[in-house]
Amino acid sequence: MRYYESVADFILPDLEGRPVSLVRGPEGVAGQLFFQKHGEKIGIPGITELDASLWPGHASLLEVASAQALAGAAQLNVIEFHTWNSTKKAIDRPDRMIFDLDPGEGTSWSHVQEAAVLTHALLHELGLKSWLKTSGGKGLHVVVPLAPRVDYDTVNAFSKAIVQHLAKTIPSRFVAKSGPANRVGKLFVDYLRNGHGATTAAAFSARARPSLGVSMPVAWDDLRSLKSGSHWTIATAREHLSFQKVDPWADYWKSRQSLAKPMRVLGFSPAR
């Protein structure tokens, strides 16, 4: 709770205005964890239930939009905060595309770093700027901000095409199928985070792991110095932010990119 109070100004911009899923651990990180996506009489002060019309046929989604809601959630055993790729203002139009670099058994950290560089390079060749953050767990997240113009099906299909291109071009490093058996010694770039209703750990969220790693935005130039996806924990993250002179994601919030040209470059045609 003290950690979340200390980083409220950092994490709230990534939470405010988005549906959020909460990972709760009443028995701690070693006990049973569960996701909570809807109100269900949650009883946390400050947490907002969004209009039920945003997701017809489902209970109301949740929003954490204030320091009070953040602290209240932490008091009631919320460890992780996961957000949608769209905001409540344009719920069906994602404003970001996320690639989760998920290492398989036997995949070294240097391999994960290399995969991030290669993913970054491909996105650059497609004309897309991307930003990097640690996952707080084993891997890394590559985030591409978008103009909210196309639907989830299109973004998800295009992200899949990008991952398939990586796997086809560099099969010794990448696989395009999930599942432990498919990625022993290789890396699966998880595009499934881009589907409707899917969520990803928010920037600055803690993770429900023994070390309580933190998902931390970092500059691409600092990738080589990272020791793991949980390079920072709740014990070290706030101090790191205190001494940070330049926000590596300062331009992220101003970037809203079109997918029209990148789709043409990759030879991708959205379904009609």
Image (tube, rainbow, N blue to C red):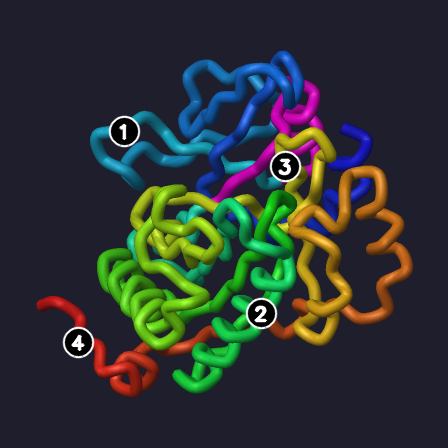
Contact between marks 1 and 2 (CB within 8 A): the answer is no
Looking at the image, tell me whether mark 1 or mark 2 is earlier in sequence order.
Answer: 1
**What residue did someone put label 4 on?**
269
Looking at the image, tell me whether mark 4 or mark 2 is earlier in sequence order.
Answer: 2
**In this rendering, would 214 be left or right of 194?**
right
At 63% across and 37% down in the image, what residue appears?
207
**What residue did someone put label 1 on?**
58
Q: At label 4, which amino acid type do we have?
A: Ser
Locate residue 103, reporting x and y percent: 51, 51
Q: At label 1, which amino acid type do we have?
A: His
Report how far apart the C-alphas of labels 3 and 4 lie in the structure.
Answer: 37 Å
Q: Residues within 10 Å of mark 2 (few under 14, many from 20)?
A: some
At 34% across and 42% down in the image, what residue appears?
197
Q: Is residue 74 magenta?
A: yes
Query: Secondary structure under badge 4?
Result: loop
**In this rendering, would 14 be left or right of 125?**
right
**What residue did someone put label 3 on?**
207
Q: Is residue 20 magenta?
A: no
Query: Magenta region: which residues?
Result: 66-83
Q: At label 3, which amino acid type do we have?
A: Arg
Using the rendered view, name the quadrant where residue 110 is placed.
bottom right
Report the disc number at residue 181. none
**What residue did someone put label 2 on?**
114
Against 96, residue 212 (above or below) is: above
Looking at the image, tell me whether mark 3 or mark 1 is earlier in sequence order.
Answer: 1
Query: Secondary structure under badge 3?
Result: loop
Report how far apart the C-alphas of labels 1 and 4 lie in the structure.
Answer: 31 Å
Locate residue 124, reporting x and y percent: 48, 83
In this view, the residue in front, 190 or 198, is: 190
